[in-house]
Image: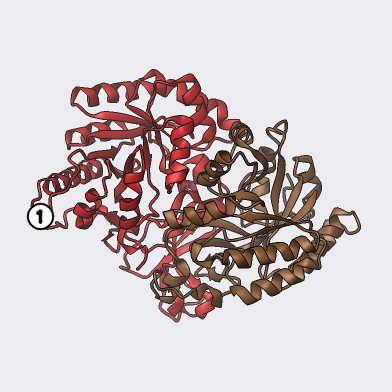
């Protein structure tokens, strides 16, 4: 294994609450990202996210331990949410975080005009995936960092980074899907509530899990049906591994190939989680500045263990140590295990 | 409101594409968006594109060139840049294209893939040279009515499948178990994509190469008054393999006040390759259809 050129690689961990923030910092995260409660950031789920006081406490805790905090104000506000988003921007800037994470043009402008000293990271939701688009945001809003959508291969990232004047962050662990972030309306089409504006994919109040007879089954008995606002996302036989209940991980019938059960498939994304550890040396070799762990909705145990595991893997890769890839995060992965995602599978 | 013809969402191959636009030349639509927004492998050669553009101009149409919505590589950017160097108006479908137009001091049409959800974002694009916005179909009528003081033309999707996801991966290749790198444009075998049904048999999505479309077709033919009130100036019809001229005629007749929306929608149902939907306009699930006689008209 070769020694990779870039010594400074940041591990950016998610925090849905103060306990998770502390767990991430204690486990070796260099930075933590988190947002305020309400629809101004994109993990707007019940019981999740920070009050101002918690955010201030989180920032103080992280700073004491040498870690950074990025505040996400990354929803796309519709007109009626604009004022709340501007206020969230003010509250975020007042706490002097190490950066804010933003995607919407109105909010980017707002930060640039009213809070010019607050560093801006371009959220993955902006879906900026080429040199010209990233330069556009850099020129107009002085972004310091971009998080790339999970739509680029290793080779494409390798080609892109030397052309850029901003830091690049990529997803390293957690939820894996193939639609480009910020350009996915699969759930909104079913629920009427956009991930871009409401920040939950999908809203749990629309999900139902019920065991019932399969109307078209071949006498195989009951299945556990997962429906989202009445639309069937999946149906599981007993002991079948389950996928996350999002439309991208649904099982559908591709009727161009025939309408029988043989054509029931994960047509968009198989139920696997992202884990880049098997390709970490190559990924670090592209010059990425930060590795992001997905999962502000996850437990503090998840945050701590994913952070610690990625920390060990990065340290090993940076010192050129050959390290077996452990199966230590299995309990945090989806039914079908892990995958290096688009980085490797894009052209496959 | 004027009708426009959006870019072909699918891959039909050169011959079929030519045949399609020859038919379009004989229709009354005034503006035609040409080019590829989905996958760079499907892009017609520049020569072929210009040949079609000139043929349409000869028939009195204004041509606008569409661009890729998810351009990633330098090769894709170079392709896009060549389009921006032509004299046609450009539909910018990602921010990099706006950068190219800014550089050239050119005005542009802001396409439907830019994530524009509020008036200040639209005003920002207007300041950079956007003279028209193709609004995100996800926006409700209430959102459309905001920011009408910004002096841009407003185009809304009138009829066709909705883009519900864009991706780096190719779903058609995945379904057929072929590699994306050596796909040989297999999506060409599915001229209206590959419809997906839920396991209990309801049409939901439609695989279209690196894009996922809705299986139902979005249709606003019963909402034209509401759209006019919301400031819409242009109505986009998306091409379908058969029946596009008939769809254009139906919309023209309703726009002219010769036919009412409720009658037209009955005729459209016969032409559409799928059920209709328009729920997003009402702030409801996109897959629902709300008609003049339907439930809870907003």
Tell me, by letter, which chain the rendering colours red.
A
Front-most of residues B111 and B103: B103
Q: Residue furthest right?
A: B258
Residue A143 in percent (x, y) is at: 41, 33
Q: Is any atom of residue B25 visible in this view? A: yes
Q: Secondary structure at mark 1?
A: loop
Residue drawn at 32 percent across, 68 percent down? A240
Q: In this rendering, would A347 be left or right of A208? A: left
State the scheme by which the image is colored.
Answer: by chain
Residue A235 in percent (x, y) is at: 43, 67
Quadrant hosting residue A120: top left
Residue drawn at 24 percent across, 40 percent down? A11
Q: In this rendering, would A329 be left or right of B172? A: left
Quadrant hosting residue A63: top left
Front-most of residues A317 and A125: A317
Q: For the C terminus of chain B, which image quadrant?
A: top right
Q: How many marks?
A: 1
Front-most of residues B158 and B76: B76
Residue drawn at 81 percent across, 59 percent down? B60
Tell me, by letter, which chain the rendering colours brown.
B
Q: Chain of mark 1?
A: A
Residue A85 in percent (x, y) is at: 51, 28
Q: Which residue is mark 1?
A: A323
Residue A67 in percent (x, y) is at: 23, 29
Q: In this rendering, would B62 be left or right of B162? A: right
Within 10 Å of disc 1 (Cα), the crowding (few <14, some 14-19, many 20+) is few
Q: Is any atom of residue A175 visible in this view? A: no
Q: Residue furthest left?
A: A321
Vertical side of B82 occupied by B140: above or below: above
């Amino acid at each position: 294994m070769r020694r990779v050129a870039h010594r400074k690689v940041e591990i950016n961990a998610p925090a849905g609450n103060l306990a998770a923030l502390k767990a991430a910092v204690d486990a070796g995260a260099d930075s933590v990202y988190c947002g305020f409660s309400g629809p101004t950031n994109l993990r707007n789920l019940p019981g999740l996210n920070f009050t101002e006081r918690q955010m201030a406490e989180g920032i103080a805790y992280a700073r004491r331990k040498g870690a950074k905090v990025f505040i996400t104000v990354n929803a796309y506000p519709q007109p009626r949410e604009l004022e709340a988003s501007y206020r969230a921007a003010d509250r975020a800037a007042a706490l002097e975080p190490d950066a804010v994470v933003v995607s919407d043009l109105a909010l980017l402008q707002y930060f640039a005009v009213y809070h010019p000293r607050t560093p801006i990271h371009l959220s993955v939701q902006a879906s900026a995936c080429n040199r010209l688009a990233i330069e556009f945001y850099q020129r107009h809003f002085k972004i310091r960092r971009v998080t790339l959508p999970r739509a680029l291969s290793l080779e494409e990232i390798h080609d892109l980074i030397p052309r850029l004047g901003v830091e690049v962050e990529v997803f390293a662990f957690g939820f894996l899907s193939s639609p480009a972030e910020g350009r996915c309306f699969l759930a909104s089409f079913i629920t009427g509530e956009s991930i871009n504006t409401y920040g939950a994919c999908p809203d749990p109040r629309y999900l139902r899990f019920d065991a019932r007879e399969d109307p078209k089954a071949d006498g195989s008995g009951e299945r556990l049906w997962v429906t989202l606002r009445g639309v069937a996302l999946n149906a599981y036989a007993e002991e079948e591994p389950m996928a996350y209940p999002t439309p991208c991980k649904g099982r559908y019938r591709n009727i161009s190939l025939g309408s029988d059960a043989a054509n029931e498939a994960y047509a968009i994304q198989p139920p696997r989680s992202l884990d880049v550890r098997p390709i970490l040396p190559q990924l670090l070799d592209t010059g990425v500045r930060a590795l992001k762990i997905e999962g502000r909705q996850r437990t503090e145990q998840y945050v701590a263990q994913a952070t610690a595991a990625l920390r060990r893997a990065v340290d090993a890769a940076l010192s050129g140590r050959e390290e077996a890839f452990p199966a230590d995060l299995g309990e945090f992965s989806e039914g079908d295990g892990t995958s290096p995602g688009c980085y490797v599978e894009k052209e496959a | 409101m004027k009708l426009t013809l959006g870019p072909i969402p699918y891959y039909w191959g050169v011959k079929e594409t030519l045949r399609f636009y020859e038919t379009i030349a004989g229709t009354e639509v005034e503006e035609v968006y040409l080019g590829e927004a989905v996958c760079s492998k499907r892009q017609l050669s520049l020569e072929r594109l210009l040949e079609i553009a000139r043929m349409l101009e000869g028939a009195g149409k204004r041509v606008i060139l569409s661009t890729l919505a998810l351009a990633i590589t330098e090769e894709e950017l170079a392709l896009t840049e060549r389009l921006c160097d032509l004299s046609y108006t450009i539909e910018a479908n990602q921010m990099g294209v706006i950068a190219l137009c800014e550089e050239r001091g050119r005005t542009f049409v802001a396409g439907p893939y830019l994530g524009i959800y509020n008036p200040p974002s639209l005003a920002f694009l207007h300041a950079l040279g956007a003279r028209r916005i193709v609004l995100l179909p996800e926006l409700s009528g209430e959102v459309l009515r905001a920011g009408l003081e910004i002096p841009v033309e407003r185009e809304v999707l009138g009829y066709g499948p909705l883009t519900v996801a864009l991706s780096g991966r190719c779903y058609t290749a995945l379904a057929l178990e072929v590699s994306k790198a050596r796909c040989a444009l297999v999506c060409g075998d599915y001229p209206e994509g590959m419809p997906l049904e839920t396991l209990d048999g309801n049409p939901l999505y439609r695989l279209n190469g690196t894009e996922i479309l809705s299986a139902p077709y979005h249709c606003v033919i019963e909402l034209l008054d509401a759209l006019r009130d919301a400031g819409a100036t242009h109505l986009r019809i998306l091409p379908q393999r058969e029946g596009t001229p008939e769809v254009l005629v139906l919309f023209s007749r309703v726009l002219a006040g010769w036919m009412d929306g409720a009658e037209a929608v009955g005729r459209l149902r016969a032409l559409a390759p799928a059920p209709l939907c328009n729920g997003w306009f009402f702030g409801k699930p996109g897959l629902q259809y709300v008609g003049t006689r339907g439930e809870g008209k907003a």
